[in-house]
Image (cartoon, rainbow, N blue to C red):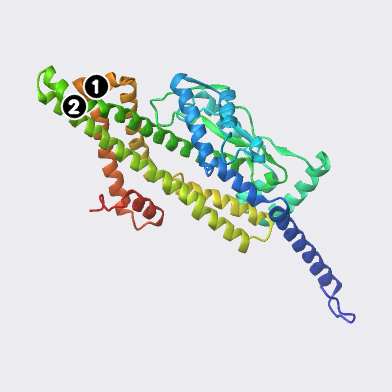
Amino acid sequence: MVFMPHSTLPCRTLATDAILCILAHQHLRHHRLFLDELKVMDMLQTFQQYFFMAAGDWAENLTEAVFAHTAQHSTLHEHSVQSMVDSSLKGTSVELDSNAVNLRATLNVPSHMAGASSRASTMQNQASPTRGASPASRASLTGDSSSSSSEACQGMAAVASRAGGSVTQQPPSNGPASVVIDNTQLKALDAVQLSFDVQWPLSLVVTQEAVQQYSAVFSWLLCLKRVSLLMRNMWLDLASCARWSNQAPAQGCEAGGVGVADAVQNRLRILQLFRHEAAHLVAALQAYMQGQVLGACWHHLQTVVLNDVTDLAELQHAHMQYLAETQHHCLMSPTTREVRAIIEPVLQCIVDCTNSCRSSCNTVNDMQDLLQDEARWDSVHKSIQEFRLRTSVLYKVLKYANGRGHYQELFVQLDFNRYYAD
């Protein structure tokens, strides 16, 4: 501000204008501090690598490791999961990532498995609803942007003066040391969650609540990864059985007629078609969700930060809006849970069918017995029929909701050849 030597403005007005200029400069300085020096956008990209599985090779290694462990052991220990997270980094695109040391694996009892523990946690949170939250994070969640920036600056100065400017926001570690995994359930791996040690002052933007929201998205994507892995294993089983089925006509004649061989061939074909349809559904869901999260949502955040964000409070708000948008496209928001409530039973049918096949068919001979045994085949066939019934409902819902933007691209990926639309 330039002061004229013969200005007739009152001193109070001049003082007020000077204070406002200083405050505006402080807001802008802290905003540029997070973007230019602290590289907050780089930190958010790190969260994408792990929580949104942008590092696909690492996510694949981790899913396979957890899947193999739970297939042999019903109990999963937290130190075992942490070891899997660390070993999955080897030989991947994030092996040399310096931020990987802050990645933590935790075990939490899911809501559908929790009993007294979840009720006790709820009572504790009600007793202290803002426990562990910084003034800036509380202000950003309530929308008080004027107070959030000033309190954030005060908090930064206070914490830096107490700890010499080096503070780490440690996530709570009150989860169980081990959990029992039920592989018959779709959400068997919901207990496996990720956390991240966010260094101060970046923890003013990536709050502990934000980390929990990242972890919720990770759990859902891990669930889809597990179902996809079940489909891959089923493909291997069917490929082995197909080689045996080429000799089925001769064996059928020896066993008492060509009709037996024809029935085996027909059942094998039903399993192959089911696996193809189920694998397409899971792949389309994965492609849609990760495409939206890593593409459209991230691009929108970059645009907002570049053009609209002018202070720390707006940066916090933009980040929380970004997380809300990602959960929306992952069918985790209140307006999209209606479709997820249809998708989850469909995925459970896939898990039921694959578990029935895997539990009965550890070898090719067992697969032969499954295809020839009426009682065992009826159990598998019922799961396939329920899958097709539920998928038809899903496609009809998406078709008639096609005009709603958040379902349009999902339906296009599921019905790329217009098979269901016609």
Give SS at disc 2.
Answer: helix
* Residue 150 quadrant: bottom right
Q: Residue at x 84, y 68 (%)?
A: 15
State which quarter of the image contains the N terminus: bottom right
Q: Nearer the viewer, residue 10 or 111?
A: 111
Residue at label 2?
264
In front: 212, or 125? 212
183 and 68: which is toward the camera: 68
What residue do we see at 46% from left, 25% from top?
A: 68
Q: Residue furthest top?
A: 255
Is residue 186 shown above or below 287?
above
Q: Residue at x 77, y 65 (%)?
A: 20
Task: Please give the name of the residue rendered at 29% of the width and 47% of the height, measured from the top-left corner.
Answer: 395
> For residue 368, which numbered disc appears in the image?
1
Note whether residue 64 is visible.
yes
Q: Amino acid at mark 2?
A: Val
Measured from the top left, where is residue 151 in percent x and y?
73, 50
The answer to whether any part of residue 176 appears in the image is no
Secondary structure under the numbered disc 1 in the rendered image? helix
Q: Give yes or no for contact between labels 2 and 1 (Cβ–Cβ under 8 Å).
A: yes
